[in-house]
Image (cartoon, coloured by chain):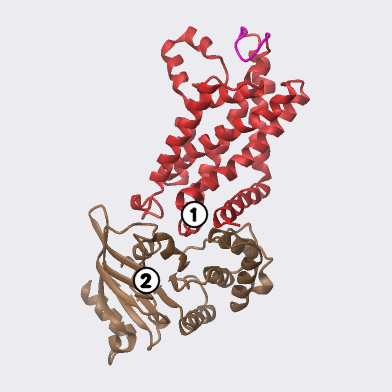
Chain colours: A brown, B red
Amino acid sequence: MSGLAVTNLTYAYGSKQALSGVSFHVAQGRFCALLGPNGAGKSTLFNLLTRLFTPHGGQIEVAGHDLARHPRAALGHLGIVFQQTTLDLDLSVQQNLSYFAALHGLAGRKARHRIDAALDRLDMRERAGEKARTLNGGHRRRAEIARSLIHDPAVLLLDEPTVGLDAATRQAITAYAHQLAEDGKTVLWATHLTDEVAVQDDLVILHKSRVLATGDAASIGGEYSLKERFLSLTGAAA
Amino acid sequence: MSPYLTSLRAIVLREALRFVHQRERFVAALVRPLVWLLVFAAGFRAALGLSIIPPYQTYITYETYIVPGLCGMILLFNGMQSSLSLVYDREMGSMKLLLTSPLPRGWLLFCKIVGSTGISILQVYVFLAIAAGFDITIPPMGYVAVLPALLVAGIMLGALGLVLSSFVKQLENFAGVMNFVIFPMFFLSSALYPLWKMAESSTLLHDICALNPFTHAVELIRFALYGQLNLTALAWTVASAAVFTALALWGYAPARSGIGRKR
């Protein structure tokens, strides 16, 4: 199955259940928002999806590759933007991206070409020589999104990528991620902000380690606004 | 170029760039062994009588005796320093980039060790050059012969640093590593005194020193500096490197969930 498929995923920190029986599927070319309040299990899910943790049960498929059985193929198709910035602040944007390209086995002209293309897409070309430390929050995020695209991944994971950004930047980055989905990438976007979800998006609502709802945002919201629906779902379950 | 070599080059280059950005660290790492060599050894020379033991063929001064131990000290402290930077990387998140690369995790960690060992070796050569400036010299061929010994010893200590970094969860706990790893390893070794001297004081301490992998790293370097191969020391160092590498791989296995653990 292409896209991203998560089946019956479970994980626990000792006796504390962090994820139980989490299943959802994001089809290729879809933007899926993973909506959940703080502590819902979003970060744990991301750690499992990126193989920083291995699940205690269940299965993850990235672009048709089983993450447990074929981790290298699966990771090769995965682009990741972590919640916390992972740029080396002492290096320039270009150096950061070259380093990442090399970790994916890309070097020389091919890497340069890909890096330039990724920076162009995010309007970051003219900042390539600047040190990451001198960039503002929005530009750091753009650099990280550019970086996550260098190896042309089929599936893109973004873990609360707009935290700490101003409204305009937040909107621009959210719109850009939607554009990527339209261009054929599978995008999973974790957030706790309902206004980042468009009506046509897929939606997974995670709360207290369980999936409360999956489907398209419009039908989950129904006659209510998504915000009201989200609050009533998570409030009622709390 | 194969993806393996590409990643190796990039990781080594990043270590080198980081090192260029932290010149203070380079100076600090040199001051420590130089103080031992030029101050401690000078004061200690009269207190410790050394007999002729291999690989030395004549009586030597105490300064000459501790040079290999201080080369080992540079490797040891740098191994721990790179482990500290790994813990920092993990707290800052950049470790995640390495661990989510599609290349085998063991290879990437090995590249990290090679990078930091390269920097350590550079420091050892600068130290040897300064020592030579103070007339503490070794045979010219020794400067070449010691290179592979430094590489093996550096990889062993780098792997040890990696093991520690996978178990030390927070930067604040690092002072404990100094007290419980670096100092015992350094003092319970042949870096500062020959083992037969230690045996005169305590056979138990002597036995501990003889088991300490750092002793064997120092002896490997000592013999290499005089163009000789100490096979026992080489075997011990390589075996220790293998054990530490295996432990580090286990420590960084995703199933252990050691990375990015909820705090």
SS at mark 1 in the image: helix
The vertical placement of B7 against B144, above or below, is below
Looking at the rendering, the stretch of residues picked out in magenta corresponds to B48-59
Q: Chain of mark 2?
A: A
Pointer 2 local density, CA inside 10 Å: few below 14, some 14–19, many at least 20: some
Element type where label 2 sits in the image = loop
Which amino acid is tagged 1? Met
Instruction: Count the marks.
Output: 2
Q: Which mark is residue A64?
A: 2
Instruction: Name the chain letter of the residue that bears numbered label 1.
Output: B
Q: Nearer the viewer, residue B113 or A93?
A: B113
Disc sitting over residue B95 in the figure: 1
Q: Is residue B165 left or right of residue B193?
A: left
Q: Could you tell me which residue is drawn at 38 percent across and 78 percent down?
A: A33
Select label 1 or label 2 by which is in front: 2
Between marks 1 and 2, how big is the CA–CA gap?
26 Å
Seen at 51% across and 73% down, the residue is: A165
Q: Position of residue A189 (x, y in %)?
A: 41, 74
Please name whichever residue, B175 or A147, is drawn nearer the observer in this view of the structure: A147
Q: Residue at x 52, y 72 (%)?
A: A152
* Quadrant (top left/top right/bottom left/bottom right) for the N terminus of chain B: bottom right
Where B106 falls versus B183 (above or below)? below
